[in-house]
Amino acid sequence: MPVTVCLAGGPEQVTLRVQDEGIGVPEKDRLRIFEPFERGSNVGNIQGTGLGLNIVKRMAEMLGGTITVEPVAPTGSRFTLILPRLPQPPSRV
C-alpha cells in the first residue's frame, strides 16, 4: 500500500501530511479516532491498541499544534499535522 509523505515549511508553521490508500477512517469515527483506546469501526481483526493517534495528538497539542484526518477517495486517509515554528535562538557572536 503506497504512503505519501509531504513536508512543507512556512515562516509561521511546519505542515506534515501523510496519506495512504488503506481502509480509511469511517466518517462516524473521525471525531473520536484521536481519543485513547479508540479504533475505527472498520478495522476488523487488524491488531492495534488505539493509542498511536492519541499520542500524536497529545504531542502536537503540547507543541502548540494540531492534527486532523480527512478521507481520500476512493479509499484511504490523509492526516495533517501542523506545528508552529519555534523562535530562533539569538545568534552568538
Image (tube, rainbow, N blue to C red):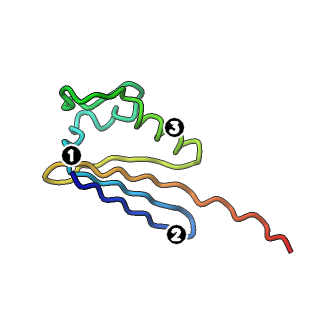
Gap in angstroms between the C-alphas marked 1 and 3: 24 Å
Residue at 34%, 34% in the rendered image = 33
How many numbered badges does the structure rendering display? Answer: 3
Residue at 43%, 47% in the rendered image = 67
Disc 3 packing (10 Å; few <14; some 14–19; many ≥20): some
Which of 81/45 is in front? 45
Residue 2, placed above or below residue 37 = below
Gap in angstroms between the C-alphas marked 3 and 2: 23 Å
Q: Give x and y (percent) for residue 80.
A: 39, 53
Horizontal side of 46 relative to 83 (left or right) equals left
The kind of secondary structure element at disc 1 is: loop
Gap in angstroms between the C-alphas marked 1 and 2: 29 Å
- What amino acid does circle 3 point to? Arg
The residue at which mark 1 appears reads as 22
- What amino acid does circle 1 point to? Gly
Q: Give x and y (percent) for residue 22.
A: 21, 46
The residue at which mark 3 appears reads as 58
Residue 77, placed above or below residue 85 = above
Q: Could you say which quadrant of the image residue 50 lies in?
A: top left
The kind of secondary structure element at disc 2 is: loop
